[in-house]
Amino acid sequence: MTQLSWFIALIPAIPLLGFLLNALFVKGEKANGLIASVAVAGAFGAAIAAVLGLNGLDEASRQISIPLWQWLAVGKLDVAFGLYYDPLTAVMTLLITGVGTLIHIFSVTYMHGDARPRRYFAYLNLFVFSMLMLVMSDNLLVLFLGWEGVGLCSFLLIGHWFERKSVQPGIVPSEAAAKAFVVNRIGDAGLLLAMMLILSRFGTLSFYGPDGNSGFFSKLSEASFTMVNLGSLGTVSVVSGIAFLMILAVVGKSAQLPLFVWLPDAMAGPTPVSALIHAATMVTAGVYLVVRNHMLFDLAPDAATWLTIIGTMTALIGATAALTQFDIKRVLAYSTISQLGFMIAATGMGAYTAAMYHLLTHGLFKALLFLAAGAIIHGLHDVQDMRRMGGLAKSMPTIYRVYLVGAFALAGIFPFAGFWSKDEILVHGWFNAQSITTTVVLLFSSLLTAFYMGRQIALTFAGEARDNELHAHEHLGTMKWPLILLAIGAVVGGLINLPGLYTLHDWLRPVLHEPTELYTVGMGVFATITTLLAAGSGYLAYRIYSGPALASIKSGAEDPAHYYLGDIWKGFELGWGVDFVYQRFFVRPYRALSEYVYEVFDVQAIDGILVEGSARSVGALARLKSQAQNGSVRTYAFVFLIGVVLVVGYMVFGA
Amino acid sequence: MLDAYVPLLAMVGIAVFIAVFVLSVSRILGPQKATVRKLAPYESGMEPIGDAMARFPIKFNLVAMLFILFDVEVIFFFPYALVYRQLGIPGLIEMGSFVLVLLVGLTYVWKKGALTWD
Amino acid sequence: MAQIALPSIDYMVILQILIIFGSATALLLIDLFIPANQKKITALLALGATIGALVAGPYSNSGVTMANAVAFGSSTLIVNSIILFATAISILFASDAMHKQGIERGETYVLMLLATGGMLLLAQGASLITLFLGLELLSIALYILTAIAYPRIASEEAGLKYLIIGAFGAGFLVFGIALTFGATGSLVLSEIATRIPVTGIERSLFFTGIGLMLVGFGYKVSLVPFHMWTPDVYQGAPTSITSFMAVGSKVAGFIAIIALVQMLGAEAQVITPVLMGIAVLTMLVGSIVAINQTSLKRMLAYSSISHAGFVLLGVLGSTQATGLRAPIFYLAAYTLTNLAAFGVIMVLEGSEERDLTLADLTGLWTRNPWLTGIMALALLSLAGVPPTVGFLGKFLVISAVWQSGYMWMAIIAAFASAFAAFFYVRALLSMFSGTTDRPRMTLDARSSLALLIVAVGIIAVGLMPWSINAIALAGS
């Protein structure tokens, strides 16, 4: 292995080591925090070294495969457990480890005094490790391993405060955790099936193969005209079939319509975990999956169209839902859903670089916003309801400043990071894809984004403190530097792909092969218009909410806008009722079905109670018991017999 | 193909016919006068005493079970007795190991006290 | 007076069976002279015999012997090793748990060895009679083992139920064998394969026979709708016995089903729709009903039903050229995982005979972190989360099914496994949450060793699946 390969292998290895150390040996909150932070920081260092090393190579050879060991060699299936490192992986690892490090450092103060710091930090490292495996895998099976690992870690971390019966606003952590896991599993089934289809058609799960030219990517084009018959559903090309199955996975993991319901509830975890899930890991996995498999989606225009539709709708729904929340973290959660919608829509339109660009800048400013929100919550002793805040600009000056930066970046105000990346997506939609509807909806969503951020700033920081029981104070400790560093990132993050320079674009060209863009006057005009609109929208919100209305907002009160919008507002607030639909049409019927099947196939239900009861109170019940027993074995035999009759019937008449 | 089964079918038919026929004939032609004697359960000419569902010691059951077990094993000796010359030494070894396993079983029940009455 | 030639016997082919049955017989005698409070000596001897048989595996000869009744080959070696491994672990579990609960009897180990012998016969059987013999030996030993905690009503009741349903199933099996024999004039699998009737009533009779045999083995591996005894028996039997029977008899039963399907060769497509229907039903009923369970053993029973559906899918997938790797690997995965799960439950029971519920897992983390870790591994493996062995098993089965062209079956299976996760997650959550005032459980060296082996196995085989194949290579 070359020196570069060693650095690459170190990137996931150090967090894994940190996890093992914390999980198995180290005790004590300080030591746990230190080890976890150092591990991720070390990974960040290795990631920087690896990027520099990769930069030293010429463009054509910027893909490095490191086979580690043969995982599976069964028949046609031949999976090497290997790492793969190319410019796309490089930027992902930088984001994951970089933002991850800051979140770890932030956690040291935030989680001070927690009952289970050891578990927390161990899982945090495992989370980073899983995400790194996901982006550094050279084949789909190992990617799937990371994919499930990320799901598992999010489950464990969201449920970290399981003993709290309800954190604000009425979410039970353990239920939220289970919801996240199960919803994700539905998406995972899609990815699993996509893998099956790829395996059965191409005989390999490797993206590029050991020599860079023998993976399933290189075989896609010859299969794009093979059709699969889906019976009554018509036919679809193999590639589209794979793409549609992958979309299912993306929708689950990246919280898109209709599977986004787990993400708002995932707030139940500690805030740094939310930051990790929303910014650096987990939800970006879906976007990464699409970008990594961009050749597949290029050959499946029907699937790509669906990506655009799903992304656009999600962007709109997320933004409208964020408008109406009073929980400071829930606003940000729906905002993440909305921003992910932007990225997914961009990938659907073929703007992979723009999607990656937005993913990176979003990673910076969303981490900033979440951590700042966490610092606020920390300073207010676990109050998350914005109606009880107000006037925090005075009591928390540092947080106020960094929050403002984050909000500007998210709202897409020139020259903050979010402006550049969001503009890339809109410009692509308007000029390149020429999809007017999509662009208009996305533009509208971005105006809503500015609006809800203006609202949030007004509710949280403007005016006077509304709840005097809260002794708001700013105690940052190790939380300070992560916030400042991320704030700097949120200001200058746009530099990585400034129009005209297109650094990220050039860097990713060996992977994505997108043609070089030329900057035109039209784009400039477009960008000017969007930023002015966004600024106007944000200012409008700030005026509305910091005006006379502000004083009347109390805990438990309705939003001023509720007066005008009524039920529509309620609908927004509930995320357009998707959750309700699930409860009504899936969860409850499934439970009922389970109950029913249980009764049919398990008459023992009643019997069990009787038997147990009689075992305890010998005597009167004993007779009942024996009767029930006879009955149940008879039932078993009867069901058995029905089975036999069916089988034999088939054999006699069907064979 | 089905022809081969015709005699079988015929035999089933005849059997059913005879059974039904004989029973119904005795029912129709025979005089039916119930007396106490006639209605009493038949126990080889003995007077029936008490309830047939009486409890009796489990030991009978155990002994009966052991008897059947070893009795059935003994049946294997009859065919062996007919052909033991033809089977020669290998047959003797096989049968010997069979007896050995039986002996282990016998030792087990003996040692466990299944053969003592009290 | 011509000599009657006895069928020649290659003792090296039946080496493992010989060791197991020989030591079972000897142990029955030896046990008589071991005092009641020293029964761990019996356990140790039984363990020694099992390990001896395990080690003898690679030295056995491949081939067919005893007038085509018993065979041995490389895949038999893997299956036998799985069975013997499960027995060894179960003996370790039983000698700890049954002693603690005060229900230790020397016969337990003898019966376990006899049941193991039955399983080996099933795995090596090359004729219908051998298969029947194996199944009966296995079953009769298990009936007694189920009821071996006999002052306990639950245990006796479970044993009786098992016996009744078992007799029912065995009846169908014999009837099936008779019909098959009638239609082909042979009992040897390889001969039957060449004599499958092409037309006429014989063909119907033959396939009816096959169907009845499937029923006979199907009840043993608890395929729906022949599964209803499973939860009751799993719940009633002592836990160490439950783990033994859940694992061993399922592996052995499936090997018999695989043997039948392989015997049919190209004709297997006739029964494919039946197998498909049963597999789907089994997966769905298992995973849907599990959600309502609170008893841990009943939950694992339903989970084992659902897993049986997956194995059957794997068998379906292997009727094509892809081979038997998928179902056999799945069985190995299932063995490791279930041994771990039942092992933890057994340790948690301690000296109580109470049936543990989900609530008993609450706060386990604060009581026994290592035990929690092992249970978590087992649950994740049951749910099929990578990198555990359970994931790989599911992956191999689904991909085998997909490659055999039953795409819709693969899709159903993928979603069934996604939904089944719900239940395991619930158990997982309760272990890591809450606090409890129940005491910390102490582990005996035997249980610790057994649990450690299976836990390491879940991860190690998950990451290095070729280790299973390595066993096969050692024999060739």
Image: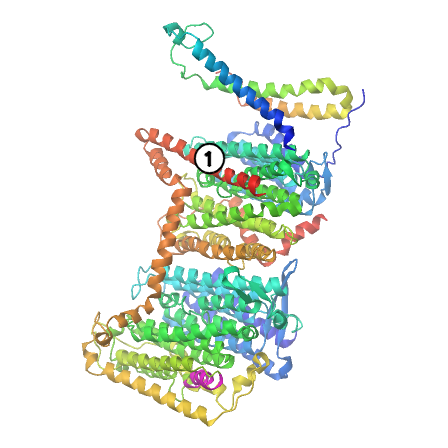
Mark 1 Cα shell of 10 Å, populated few (<14), some (14-19), many (≥20): many
Task: Tally the numbered discs.
Answer: 1
Toward the viewer: A290 or A67?
Answer: A290
User: Split into 4 quadrants, where in the image is the N terminus of chain C?
Assistant: top right
Q: Position of residue A306 (x, y in %)?
A: 46, 72
Q: Residue furthest right?
A: C2
Does residue C453 appear in the picture of this structure?
A: no
In this rendering, the answer to whether C29 lies above or below C273 is: above
Residue under mark 1: which chain is it in? A
Q: Which image quarter: residue C247?
A: top right
In this rendering, the answer to whether C70 lies above or below A237 is: above
Toward the viewer: A137 or C418?
Answer: C418
Q: Amino acid at mark 1?
A: Ala
Q: Position of residue C192 (x, y in %)?
A: 68, 38
Q: Which residue is mark 1?
A: A637
Toward the viewer: C301 or C206?
Answer: C206
Q: Is residue C219 left or right of residue A373?
A: right
Q: Position of residue A482 (x, y in %)?
A: 41, 78
Q: Which image quarter: residue A102?
A: bottom left
- Secondary structure mostly seen in magenta is helix
In this rendering, the answer to whether A483 lies above or below A167 is: below
Q: Position of residue C397 (x, y in %)?
A: 57, 54
What range of the chain is rendered magenta?
Answer: A419-432
Residue B7 colored magenta? no
